[in-house]
Amino acid sequence: MSYTGVYDKTIFFNPANKYSVISVKTTDRSVPEKARDAYRHRDRMIRFCAVGYDLPRTDQVSMILDGEWLDGKNGCQLHVTQCEEVVPQTKEGVQGYLASKLIKGVGEKTAAMIVGRFGADALRVLEKEPERLLEIKGITEGKLADIQASYAESTALRDLMILLSPFKITPVAATKIYEHFGARSVEILRDNPFELCQMSGFGFLRVDAIVLKNGCSLNAPMRIQGAVYAALDKQREDNGHLFLTDEELLKAAMGLLNKNLPLPQMKVKSTEVAPVIEDMLLHGRITCSNGNYYPVRCFAQEDETALQIAKIISAPSQQTDIRRTLETVRAKLGVELSQRQTEAVYMAFRHNLSIITGSPGTGKTTVLKAVIEVFRALRPDGKILLAAPTGRASRRMAESTGITDAKTLHSALGLLGEDGAFQKDQKDKPIDAALIIVDEMSMMDMWLARQFFTRIGADSKVVLVGDADQLQSVGAGDVFRELIGCGLIPVTILNEIFRQKQDSLIAYNAQKINTDDTDFYYGNDFSVRKCKTQEEAAEHIKSLYFMCVQEYGLERVQILSPFRSTGAASVEQLNEVIRETINPPGDDTIDLKVGGVYFRNGDKIMQNKNNAKASNGDIGFIRQIARDEKNEIKILLRFFPDREVEYRMADMEHIELAYATTVHKAQGSEFDVVIFPIIKSHAMMLTRSLVYTAITRAKCKVILVGQLGMLFMAVHKNDTGKRNTMLGKRIGLYVKAFSTSKRVSGTVEELEQLKKIS
């Protein structure tokens, strides 16, 4: 049902996503009694609350609202699915609308001049002939661009809602579509709705069902193209593949196209799919190399990364005799380096790019300290960059090496987030460091590898450090293992454990896991609490957590779980149970709802995406939830070790509770105590690399909760499966091309020639 009304006042507005809660006044007596404002106003008009996105916040227009009445803690509100603005077609009405500050760059004075020139026809001119606004004194081309962009934005979201309303897509989803595609959202979706598949939550099958209902034929090229894109994206997201072979792609695409078709005669045939794939290749929509089909961006990531690595390892390396310097550093640090540790230090100075790998306790940090001190002695003015994929990993580097300004890779590269946006003037700018050391390399995916290797300066030495036995990167690619396996980069494998504390069993058991040895050492710092079900495990975990927190502190104890949301021992359910016990609500507690999660003062939280204020993986506490003088919510967070930031509601989208977290999210982090459930209902997720990564997050104590049989099963289940990537082979091709060319200056033309050779 539709309701016509006029804006009364703003109750809440989020400028980041234009989420609006407004009071609307109307004479419509069909508004439900329970939704009406209880206060009797002098104008005798009915007030009700409307909730939606980019609702008009001016009384210069009438609005026609479609939506659904829903009850909530704030009473009965109209949740708007469609809003149409009705501007009075008079000079006064149009001028009032233009002067309402809804359109950037148009104030009262400018609005008066526009209406004075074009009269009631001003809105048609703004929409159809905007260049005529340049006839108005004071409107420059730059100001006109701002006016056009603001007007387009104010109408695009409403037009999008009208387009999507038959498909029962919520205003929240529509806003995400607009944020993804921008002002061209309506145009893009009218031309090819399968573009929606680029977005999380809009899989091929969901979009396909909508499109088929609207008359699209089963073998339409648009539909087949959508399935091809979706097949490549699904394998990239689910299995980390950068490409699919021709057979794999054809099979995956046909599986999507024919999934829900009941009759054999309805099935789309391979002879209909193959020509569309060829057409996509011809028009550059996908890429093929040696029979491997890539999304265009994935091929560019792999190819450019391989080219830059080949340039680094093919360039002459400056040789320096470090024998005497290393002896001095050994004495200064008071350490004895093993033969392999010594080789690793020499390797870092003999080659432009080198790799150090090994499990915990094998002395990687000692080697890095030695490399840094030798470099400082040889080049006192040379800049050193220490970096890692996560904030916690970079801070661990700072603590262990003494270089306090270790950074995340995103910060070092000037990246603002995961979408490739850069800080001002940072794109393509080489990293300003003579020695670059990157830790936790197993977490680096191909996207981040491209950003990193294309920014290394010609005179920099690069040392990559990591543990190849950990879980593979969350993103696509298998960069660290490919670099180790290509045979072109010098690698030192540290395999001798140096932690000699009598009760330090974690490092030894980690090594046993990697050799299929289940004859573990048990003791105070490595123990198993036996149980069978998730419910039993959850009870044990809760009691163990409180006990360990009392001894070590809340910051230093972490629950890790294989599952995010399934079962009592999953991350989400453990977070709820433990939070309600360790941080229960009080009489004055404010519960802040963000999505489907409630937060309160004192909660342990984690940032799950990089932004300007915090890094992915940062853990901390909520210190305060309050309202400012404008009645807007502000949240004060303290991230470990002692960094306070202020968040608004829009920032909280990427905050989650962190009493428990997944093993993947814990990569790059280290805690004194790790509690980890390992039970039969988790069998699907339990693998050698997952268990290995979980227990190696602990410095002092590991407590496994569950069944030894499941632990033994996981140790023998190696999941470091081969991901579809040609990075190592492609590096080899470029190195061969460099070695056979007479001269390589690095110009664009010559590099293009090298690509053709390879």
Image: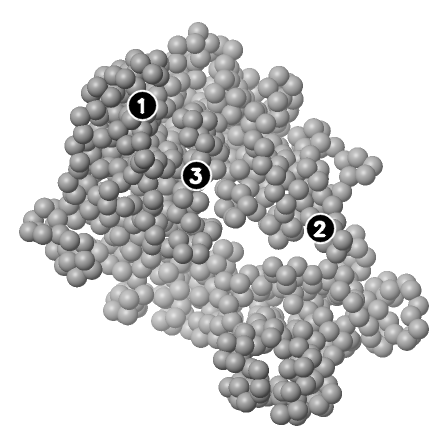
Q: Give the amino acid at mark 2.
A: Ile
- x and y percentages locating residue 558 in the rendered image: 56, 27
Q: Residues within 10 Å of mark 2 (few under 14, many from 20)?
A: some
Q: Are circles 1 and 2 on residues that touch, CB within 8 Å? A: no
Mark number displayed over residue 370: 1
Whether residue 233 is visible, yes or no, is no
Residue under pointer 3? 407
- The tag earlier along the polypeptide, 2 or 3, is 3
User: Where is residue 720 drawn, in percent x and y?
Assistant: 34, 35
Return the residue found at the far top: 502
> Tag 3's secondary structure?
strand
Is 612 placed above or below 374 here? below
How are the residues colored? one colour
Tag 3: Cα neighbours inside 10 Å, few (<14), some, or many (≥20)?
Answer: many
**Is the Cβ of the residue at disc 2 closer than 8 Å to that at disc 3?**
no
State whether residue 706 is above or below residue 259.
above
**To which residue does mark 2 refer?**
633
Mark 1 or 2, nearer chain start:
1
Give the side of residue 549 with respect to residue 309, left or right. right
Q: Position of residue 676 (x, y in %)?
A: 52, 25
Mark 2 to mark 3 CA distance (whole Å): 30 Å
